[in-house]
Amino acid sequence: MTTVLLLGESEELTAAFRRLGVTVRTAPAGGAGEGLRGLVEKHGADIVVPLTEDIDVDALEALEASGVTVAPSARGCALTVTRDRLRRTANEELGLPTTAYRFADTREEFTAAVEELGLPCIVKPATFGSGHAVVRTEADLAGAWQGDRVMVERFVDFDHELTMLAVRSVDPATGRLATWFCEPLGHTHREGALVAAWQPMEVNPRALENARSMTARITNALGGRGLFTVEMFVAGEDVYFSAVTPRPHRIGAVTLCTQRFSQWDLHARAILGLPIDTTLISPGACAPLTGPPGTADLAAALAVPESDVRLYDGTAGVALATAETVDTARERVAQMASTIG
């Protein structure tokens, strides 16, 4: 029986693997060097699946070199652990369109980057994580600089954000690696926090073609098997690369109600080299929950038509709703979130 070691927690991915007859073990993501190798030996793990950027990529590369499968790949984890590494790969090596950006290690470099790129601009931690600051005026500068390395990004007047879920696995017809695309996802953020996501997202046909091409190029560069989350901005037919995560993402939680197989099911199937099915079964939307609801609030939320709620131990849950149209699904999930919140 195959044994998978998850570096980090994911109830959905754990369940997805177990439904496929896989033994799942979990360990803290911060393990490094010989400690990580010891975990692999202790659990008899055949596959190691990192679930966060907080990981020793050198240890992952050593494990992979010794014959242990790292999913999607040690290279993919190494390239996505920091924004500067990823931007160099995407923009400078692959030639993917991105917004103008600069990295800053000191207050002086930060001030110079803002002056060069102009206001407004966006300031993000150089190491991937949630949250960012929008600097609109010089008065915002003091709060945006926290003393750690950051990426300063020129503000783009985009039409909307877009996320593509790509699945790399073995094509049963050819025995070779191939890529499948889920229907595009739309989403909104407020002060860096996800407010809602929905699927499918209506996208200009030419922009969607560009988005799929961009997604294929960046995921091919990362390599390996698994599900990848690629975030981008769309302005007309133009698409700008923003980020890629070599694993399921909170935006993709909407697939729990929209697709035949959720993003976690697809990640597990791809890692195991099993057939992939990205069929969309219904338009839908999701919204993160800020805390555990009371019984009455939960009952009121689930009284919304075609609704569901997933609550997780120790992490925020998610409200889900389907409908005949995305607009109606978004209205339903907003009603659920307001009821519970």
Image: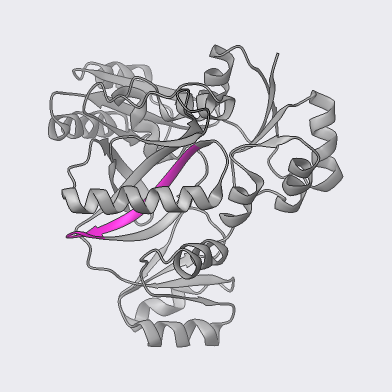
53 displayed left or right of 233: right
Instruction: Please identify the quarter of the rendering in which residue 136 is found.
Output: bottom left
Give coordinates of residue 20: x percent, y percent. Answer: 56, 14
Magenta includes 237? yes
Q: Position of residue 165 (x, y in %)?
A: 38, 39
Residue 161 magenta-highlighted: no
User: What residue is at 35 percent from the left and 27 percent from the top?
Assistant: 278
Q: Pick the quarter of the image with the N terminus.
A: top right
Region in magenta: 227-238
Q: Nearer the viewer, residue 63 or 147?
A: 63
Viewer can see residue 313: no
Q: Position of residue 130 (x, y in %)?
A: 47, 53
Residue at 43% over, 33% down: 291
Scheme of colours in the image: one colour
Q: Nearer the viewer, residue 162 or 304?
A: 162
- Report the side of 66 relative to 151 (left or right): right
Q: Name the side, left or right, on which 130 lies relative to 236.
A: right
Chief secondary structure of the magenta portion: strand
Residue at image coords 57%, 20% = 17
Q: Quadrant of residue 210?
A: bottom left
Q: Quadrant of the C terminus?
A: top left
